[in-house]
Image (cartoon, helix red, strand yellow):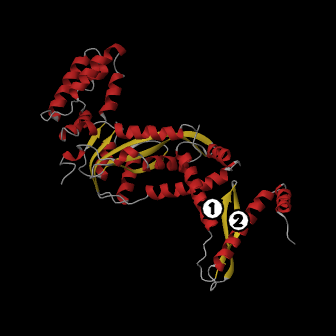
Amino acid sequence: MDLTKVQISELMRKHAERENGLHDLLEIMLESMMVAERGEFLRNNPSNKGNGYRPGHTYGQGRRLEFRIPRDRYGNFHPQILAILRNQEEECDRLAGVLYTKGLTQEQVADVFGQIYGENYSKASVSRMVQCVREQVSQWLERGLEAYYPVVFVDCVHIKIHRKRSVATEAFYVALAVTEEGRREVLGIWNMPTESATGWGTLFGTLKARGVERVGLVVADGIAGLDTVVGEKFPGTPLQRCVTHLKRNMFARVRHGDKAALAADLRDVFRTGQRDYTVEMAWAAWQAMCDRWGKDYGSIKLLRNNADYKAYMTYLNYSPEIQSMIYPTNWIERLNRDFRRVTKMRTAMPNEESVLTLMGSVAMEHKPFDRVLPRITSDKTLFPD
């Protein structure tokens, strides 16, 4: 029986009003279009014949669509409509991954897809879409590393996550390196409940297991015991403490009205770019500064002979052209701000994996890391020919 276009349309309308009716119609239409496409293909290839079907699926309207894909005898028939569907699916996956890694929650991504495609996508659908991002980040975080990195910056970013039905702030360790080519590269991101020298020791061991044999210089904030850990894991590697962190701590020791004068004195102690300014000269300037300020502030007087503060002057052993790059942890702190930006839209992250996925995506796509740092390779101690 031949039906008119109006009759077919009415039958489809009635079926679409049933539960899952629209879903069924989409599957029927896709399968019918592929069968018709195969018929056209076989008419142009008379020596070939149809050879049944194989199962297939795609996603539409936020749900899985299942259908039969027609085959030919020689395996030469490939439905064009299927290629279009696959391209759309890949594009949806990519878009969902981009939105998720830019800071949107899975629920917010589902809302965006609902506005675009006119149908609400479940969290499960969005979770499937971003799964490819999780897999890519996981592989990247476990990749093999180079044997030598001239400079490695280490720091922690603290993020709230759910664990055992409670929410707490946990530490996510980040290691950012400068490569021998003069580019920046995140070596790894790891999670532990708190930051400690012992934790860094464990993670340095992880770097070694992934191929790192030697590090030219480690730059870090003032966490206690880190110098010992660095010496154990990478013997002979110097440690540069972050001068910016030191200045902040020093400002906390004086009244607000004295901070400008103290800042000027600290700039004089921690000079950069002067070839004739040595660690010994900086140490003498530090002690003189502590003597001056110690007359009014006892907490500063106590720092005068503390040899631990020489670790803030390690940068003076290197070329003046790179001293301003290696004496603070500014690069890794900027990266940490980007990490916080993509997680701050959530009151707390659902689990450790979700944080690593977001942070890893940011690190992988961080555009400033693509360029070579100017003059960084001029120091032949860290960057030998």
Picture coordinates of residue 267 (x, y %)? 24, 25
Residue situated in front as seen by the camera: 143 or 259: 143
Q: Which quarter shows the N terminus?
A: bottom right
Callout 1 environment at 10 Å: few (<14), some (14 to 19), or many (20+)? some
Describe residue 233's horizontal placement relative to residue 315 as left or right: right
Q: Nearer the viewer, residue 138 or 210?
A: 138
Q: Residue at x 47, y 49 (%)?
A: 360
Question: In screen coordinates, is 111 left or right of 378?
Answer: right
Q: Among all residues in the image, which is located at the extreme bottom?
A: 47
Give the structural element (helix, strand or loop) at label 2.
Answer: helix
Amino acid carrying label 1: it is Leu
Rendering coords of residue 69 (x, y %): 67, 72
Residue drawn at point x = 39 percent, y = 41 percent = 155
Query: How far, Cα to Cα, is label 1 from label 2?
Result: 10 Å
321 sits to left or right of 15: left
Residue type, numbered disc 2? Leu
Residue 159, relative to residue 205: is it above or below?
Answer: above
Disc 1 vs disc 2: Cβ atoms closer than 8 Å? yes
Q: Which residue is mark 2?
A: 30
Q: Quadrant of the C terminus?
A: bottom left
